[in-house]
Image (tube, helix red, strand yellow):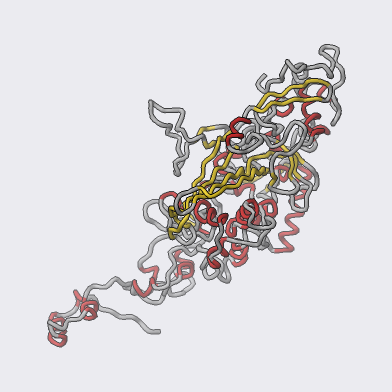
């Protein structure tokens, strides 16, 4: 082994220094000679890890990442590379990685033999790394591909330099929320995004210490990316993005409720699970978040957990725990279930950060499991508010340039987004499944959201309009706004917005005849769109929009009528405790009532049913 021995200049005898000047000559004093004589930054002793491995980095670096990655056990070189056998700073740092979690190098660092080999390979093909669903769906919506299952990834865009109008839009407005993004290269709050493994598993240490590496990912790391589009990271915390006017004003100034990117927000009831102290990873398993090694195209293929995973009878949960334990032993892989704990015959969910045991309660037998509600998803009732962003106006101006977030270079084409309005109340409902990849073997009532209502305009290099296109698409989601209570009966059976008809006036004009007048039609016509932006279906059950999946749809005419029939009785029969409601048969119209007009006459056209009544 070669040792790099250097003697600081302050310990050399004076005659050695003078002799050096004589031999080199004052006028021929070179930079190399000066480098040799000046004080050097170097380690003054040989340092080793607890296993005896030489790692000279430890002589200078005192930082401690965490107990599992302890400096005395692993050293610095194992993760950060470089040269651990020299005490010279410059030589030691040559080839060193500041962020070992960067996916470009993760196979050599986090994924090296003996460490997280499988996890790194899973992450590389996960949706958070590939953005495959976002890219293929966007291209399909914009007419650039035949279907939304295209095998295209962020890495393809980077390495193959793929581009198109849809991909240009993604590159400039969307390409910061993927794990191939280099951490710290973008300005402001965007600098926190990306970084591969480090995007999730690290937090800044107090002062200037080494970042802390965490197994239990904190909520704020998830919300760093999951705060746009579906906005589930914000909604989970009770944060509702407002229209952007900065109201309500505070002492004559703009609201102080503002996100890092400048968006204003209002505070609404947070998710009951957030209120209980649960974070994302308490429900979502390693396979869901990091992937399972398969190249899934869409989120529903990778997400496995549902409300019923936890909210089931104790015996069902115990059986699921036994099956999961057998699978783990057989496959030597991670769990498919959250961290369930059996204590005194009851099953609890153990929080990965708060370490508390959270009670798991089964659904209420009548309200949730009755025949008339057997097709309802949990969210359809218990997500009482959902962000709904209507009218996504997108404009690209090729007379201007904008930063490409993948190449980090400004290129022609500046993209901007605007919206018509955003709403949170009365989430629309529709039907999902069954389908080959719908995640459901039967049809279920789910929450519908605009996703997206694209109205795209193009301006040429002279700033002149050259054309546009429109596509109004509806998707479904779990908004992560679950409440202990639920919507009222009137909130579904009377409110036109819940039926995806949109805001307007709804009334019963005779036997089997419902009428509806929308409120937003004039605004939509100004945009060159026939139906109102908040109308996904008309009163006769004809869809007015596209759907994000073939197995997603709005209610048909028969279903709309059946839902509204119940509303005819709600003025007197208020809810589940009423015997009439408890004995209601699915699909049956209300029987004639001695205390009201006959159903075929009540209410008449001049007696509208108001959602707020």
Q: Quadrant of residue 517?
A: top right
461 or 534, which lies in front? 461
Whether residue 496 appears in this view of the structure is yes
Residue 240: x, y in percent? 54, 36
Residue 64: x, y in percent? 43, 60
| Residue at left offset 45%, top offset 37% | 258
228 or 124, which lies in front? 228
| Residue at left offset 63%, top offset 38% | 529
47 or 319, which lies in front? 319
Tell me: residue 447, above or below residue 8: above
Quadrant location of the N terminus? bottom left
Q: Is residue 482 left or right of residue 539?
A: left
| Residue at left offset 37%, top offset 76% | 86
Residue 9: x, y in percent? 20, 76
Could you tell me how many numbered marks the image carries? 0
Residue 207: x, y in percent? 37, 52
Q: Quadrant of residue 211?
A: bottom left
Tell me: residue 9, above or below residue 274: below
Tell me: residue 506, above or below residue 165: above
Tell me: residue 453, above or below residue 523: below
């Amino acid at each position: 082994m070669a040792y790099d021995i250097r003697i600081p200049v302050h310990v050399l005898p004076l005659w050695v220094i003078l002799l050096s000047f004589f031999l080199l000559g004052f006028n021929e004093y070179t930079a190399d000679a000066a480098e040799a004589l000046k004080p050097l930054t170097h380690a003054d002793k040989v340092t080793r890890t607890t296993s005896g491995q030489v790692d000279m980095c430890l002589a200078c670096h005192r930082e401690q990442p965490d107990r599992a990655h302890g400096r005395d056990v692993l050293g610095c070189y194992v993760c950060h590379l470089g040269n651990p056998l020299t005490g010279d700073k410059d030589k030691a740092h040559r080839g060193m990685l500041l962020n070992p979690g960067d996916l470009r190098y993760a196979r050599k660092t986090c994924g090296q033999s003996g460490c997280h080999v499988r996890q790194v390979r899973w992450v590389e093909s996960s949706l958070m790394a590939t953005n495959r669903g976002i890219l293929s769906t966007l291209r399909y919506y914009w007419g650039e591909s035949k279907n939304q299952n295209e095998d295209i990834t962020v890495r393809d865009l980077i390495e193959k330099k793929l581009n198109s109008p849809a991909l240009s839009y993604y590159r400039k407005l969307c390409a910061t929320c993927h794990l191939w993004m280099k951490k710290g290269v973008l300005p402001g709050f965007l600098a926190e995004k990306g970084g591969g493994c480090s995007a999730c598993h690290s937090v800044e240490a107090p002062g200037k210490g080494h970042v802390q590496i965490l197994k239990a990912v904190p909520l704020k790391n998830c919300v760093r990316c999951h705060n746009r589009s579906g906005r589930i990271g914000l909604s989970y915390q009770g944060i509702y993005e407002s229209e952007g006017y900065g109201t309500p004003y505070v002492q004559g100034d703009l609201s102080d409720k503002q996100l890092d990117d400048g968006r204003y927000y209002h505070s609404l009831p947070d998710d009951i699970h957030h209120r209980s102290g649960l974070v994302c990873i308490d429900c979502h398993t390693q396979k869901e978040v990091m992937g399972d090694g398969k190249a899934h195209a869409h989120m529903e293929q990778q997400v496995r957990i549902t409300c019923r995973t936890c909210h089931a009878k104790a015996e069902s949960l115990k059986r699921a725990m036994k099956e999961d334990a057998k699978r783990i032993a057989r496959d030597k892989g991670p769990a498919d279930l959250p961290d369930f704990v059996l204590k005194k015959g009851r099953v609890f969910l153990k929080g990965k950060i708060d370490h508390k045991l959270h009670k798991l309660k089964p659904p209420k037998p009548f309200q949730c499991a009755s025949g008339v509600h057997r097709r309802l998803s949990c969210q359809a009732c218990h997500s009482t508010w959902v962000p709904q962003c209507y009218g996504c106006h997108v404009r690209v101006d090729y007379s201007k340039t904008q930063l490409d977030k993948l190449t980090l270079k400004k290129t022609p084409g500046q993209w901007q987004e605007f919206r018509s309005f955003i709403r949170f109340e009365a989430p629309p409902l529709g039907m999902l499944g069954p389908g080959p990849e719908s995640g459901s073997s039967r049809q279920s009532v789910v929450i519908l959201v605009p996703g997206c209502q694209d109205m795209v305009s193009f301006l040429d290099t002279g700033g002149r309009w050259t054309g546009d296109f429109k596509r109004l698409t509806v998707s479904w989601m779990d908004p992560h706004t679950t409440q202990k209570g639920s919507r009222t009966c009137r909130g579904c059976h009377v409110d036109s917005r819940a039926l995806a008809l949109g805001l307007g006036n709804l009334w019963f004009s005779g036997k089997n005849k419902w009428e509806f007048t929308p409120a937003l039609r004039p605004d939509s016509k100004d945009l060159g769109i026939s139906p109102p932006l908040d109308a996904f279906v008309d009163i006769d059950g004809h869809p007015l929009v596209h759907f994000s999946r073939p197995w997603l749809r709005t209610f048909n005419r028969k279903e709309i009528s059946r839902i509204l029939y119940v509303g005819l009785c709600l003025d007197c029969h208020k809810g589940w405790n009423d015997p009439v409601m408890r004995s209601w048969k699915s699909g049956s119209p209300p029987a004639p009532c001695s205390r009201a007009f006959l159903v075929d006459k009540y209410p008449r056209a001049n007696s509208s049913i108001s959602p707020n009544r």
